[in-house]
Image (spheres, grey):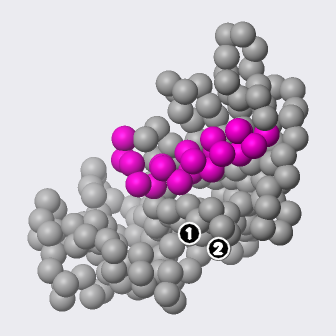
Amino acid sequence: MFETLDEVRRDWLGRLARAPRDRKCPMHTPVVVSAPADARVMVLRAFDQATGVLRFHTDTRSPKVAAIADDPRMAVLLYDKSAKIQIRLRGTGRVETDGPIADAAWAAGTNFARRCYLGDGPGSLADGPTSGLPPEFEGAEPDDAQLVPARPNFAVLLIELAEVDWLYLAHTGHMRAQFTRGGESWEGRWVTP
């Protein structure tokens, strides 16, 4: 099935390109890890093949924003159970709150999705179970004017990939390949699983 490093490279590039566009894709919600070994599931919003950059959305008040500023090393784990393919990524993260990338991501969101940034910051203490949203926005879509205070809480997390570890699980024998980014290209090698 995968006999060359070029086939493997095309496979993981294709999966990363598809995941942001297809909510049903198993790799749409990977596990994202920042220091100190803090993991969470996030929605993959975009992958730029030319630059090797993944894009996620985050809240500026999230503890991970400060953690990434202190230590930008990041890892991402994606798994497609039916295809039996695991992809582990390593790279450098940065959070952008302003500028063309953050502004375009904010503009592309729906008001219903943007309302998440109106609520209490991630990890805020609560008296009981809560979404953290103001009561008037529980299950309701705010208008553009109501979202003005939410924009300063929105940011994009960009992860510039440096390493890819691709693993295919097969009953006939697993296969594994690793790729490192050198300039604008990816250099691959076969390794034992």
**Viewer-proximal residue, 169 or 141?**
169
The reply to whether the magenta stretch includes residue 101 is no
In the image shown, does 21 or 141 lie closer to the viewer?
A: 21
> Which numbered tag is attached to residue 157?
1
Residue linked to disc 2: 94
Residue 123 appears at what percent x and percent y? 45, 61
Label 1 sits on a secondary structure element that is strand
| Res 136 → quadrant | bottom left
| Residues in magenta, as a range | 5-24
User: Mark 2 is on which residue type?
Assistant: Arg
Q: Residue shown at 41%/75% (left/top)?
A: 105
* Observer-nearest of 79 and 39: 79
Answer left or right for 192 relative to 153: right
Separation of residues labelled 1 and 2 (CA atoms): 6 Å
Q: Quadrant of the C terminus?
A: top right
- Is residue 5 shown left or right of residue 191? left
